[in-house]
Image: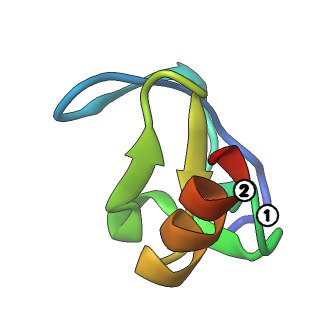
Amino acid sequence: MSGIKAKLKYLANSFEVIEKGDHVECAISKKKIPLENLNYWNVELQEAYFSPVEVKKRFENLK
């Protein structure tokens, strides 16, 4: 990773790169997620998650 944080627009089944970079930050854990490994995000909240564990934490916090 070059260390440049990307800015993305999260879509239903993909994402659009707004500002080039090689990673994004998990909204919960703050871990860096390389774009090639990005699998979890929330379109409505426009945020990325490192793994299903963070997805579950966000969902529980929203209840």
Q: What residue does disc 2 label?
A: 61
Expressed as whole percent of the image width and height from the top left, the position of residue 54 reads 59, 73
Q: Is residue 39 above or below residue 12?
A: below
Q: Residues within 10 Å of mark 1 (few under 14, many from 20)?
A: few
Q: What residue does disc 1 label?
A: 3
Total marks shown come to 2
Which residue is found at the position 63% from the left and 44% from the top? 21
Closer to viewer: mark 1 or mark 2: 2
Which residue is found at the position 64% from the left and 58% from the top? 58
Which residue is found at the position 51% from the left and 70% from the top? 56
Which residue is found at the position 51% from the left and 65% from the top? 55
Q: Nearer the viewer, residue 23 or 55?
A: 55
Expressed as whole percent of the image width and height from the top left, the position of residue 40 reads 39, 58
* Left or right of 12, for residue 4: right
| Residue 28's disc number | none
Q: Is residue 51 above or below residue 45?
A: below
Q: Is residue 1 above or below residue 8?
A: below
Q: Is residue 50 above or below residue 59?
A: below
Q: Amino acid at mark 2?
A: Asn
Element at badge 1? loop
Element at badge 2? helix
Expressed as whole percent of the image width and height from the top left, the position of residue 14 reads 23, 33
Q: Residue furthest front?
A: 63
Q: Residues within 10 Å of mark 2 (few under 14, many from 20)?
A: few
Q: Nearer the viewer, residue 20 or 34?
A: 34
- Name the quadrant containing residue 46: top right
* Left or right of 30, for residue 6: left
* Left or right of 25, for residue 33: left
| C-alpha gap between disc 1 and disc 2 | 29 Å
Q: Amino acid at mark 1?
A: Gly
* Left or right of 16, for residue 49: right
